[in-house]
Amino acid sequence: MKRSAITYFTNLYPSPWEPTRAAYNYQIVEALRDFADVDVLVPVPAHIYFKQLLKGKLKQSRACFFPFLFLPGFGRRTYSLTLLISMLCCIFPFIKLARSEKIVASWAFPEGVVATWFKRIYGNRVVIHCVGTDINLHFQQNGRQSQMLNAFQCADAVITVSKDLANKISQKATSPLPLSTVYNGVSFDAFSAPPVAQHTPRLLFIGNWLRTKGVFELIDGMALLQENGIQVTLDIVGKGPEEQAMAERIAQLNLGDRITLRGPVMHKDIPGVLMNATALILPSYREGVPNVIMEALAAGIPPIATAVGGIPEIITDGVNGILIHELTALSVANSVEAALNNAWDPDALRHSVATYTWENCARGFLNAFGDE
């Protein structure tokens, strides 16, 4: 049987200069490669692209990177047009997408919009993959929303990583859309080692250091735990623009012996980091379904997370994790105490995500194309 050919079109993909970026998309691509021939097409902001080109970094990846010409933060509703123009200027990305039998556009705007323009002209089969901020942020802006709704109507299928995202799209649609939810997976073999018992409970945050990730509520919550005499430490893994402000807040609250800013880690090293944690904590303002929550559960580690986006679809409060229903420093502290006082069963935590495999995820994409 002839293997189908898929072009995976996304700005969210690991690169030689940012190897920890969107590891879930790399895993989806690798899972799809068990069933199909997959090429990856990655638009990169032009100033970053040419900087990395001069360093010779672009030769170190199987993915095809190309420069995306746009003005960051200005005229965002025009990004679909500027992405198309960028592809025309580079020639190869345009030809590649035009000749693609099947396209997965993983990011609804602008990739999903541009992919459906190709579908209208060249008849490609297109699946748009909505992952979180594309719907939680971009879809809420009228100029971008209208483009995205037109793209959703044109696409062969629209996949969301959570039912919550699918509902947000449906509420704005004026006619039925080809929506389905396909959850990301977990590489269970990588998370099979038992958690390491800690003398002092250790919390772990993994994510971007952004205000919208709840990092300051988390730091303030740690201060309340210290005031209440709760012995617990926190490792904050990742990177982001709030690093200096976070360090200053930690110093201001005299939490230097309790909180450690660890910096980023490669995805292959996350199992080892999780092994040494008592609980994962993720107090985000908005989310799709963070893969690190499913990875924590696969490792037998309970997650503590805000009840936003698709998180309540994975976590049942008090059963396989703790949900924070109102994001404040006090609620963070109370949720941590609840997690520390619960006698978690690691095997039960693992079983709660047993169906979320990368193979099932890949089959969900193939089903969207009608290939399964």
Image (cartoon, rainbow, N blue to C red):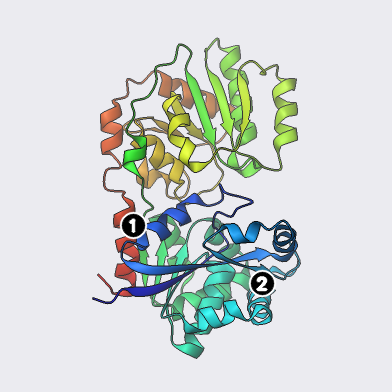
Residue at which label 1 appears: 361
Quadrant of the rendered image containing residue 74: bottom right
How dense is the environment of label 1, judged by Cα within 10 Å: few (below 14), some, or many (20 and up)? many
* Total tally of numbered discs in the picture: 2
| 167 to the left or right of 65 | left
Q: Residue at x 43, y 67 (%)?
A: 170
- Quadrant (top left, top right, bottom left, bottom right) of the C terminus: bottom left
Going by the numbered disc 1, the residue's amino acid type is Cys
Q: Residue furthest bottom?
A: 121
Q: Nearer the viewer, mark 2 or mark 1?
A: 1
Residue at which label 2 appears: 79
Q: Secondary structure at mark 1?
A: helix
Residue 177 percent location from the top left of the image: 39, 74
Residue 299 percent location from the top left of the image: 36, 33
Going by the numbered disc 2, the residue's amino acid type is Tyr
Quadrant of the rendered image containing residue 157: bottom left
Front position in the image: 252 or 168: 252
- Residue at mark 2 to residue at mark 1: CA–CA distance: 29 Å
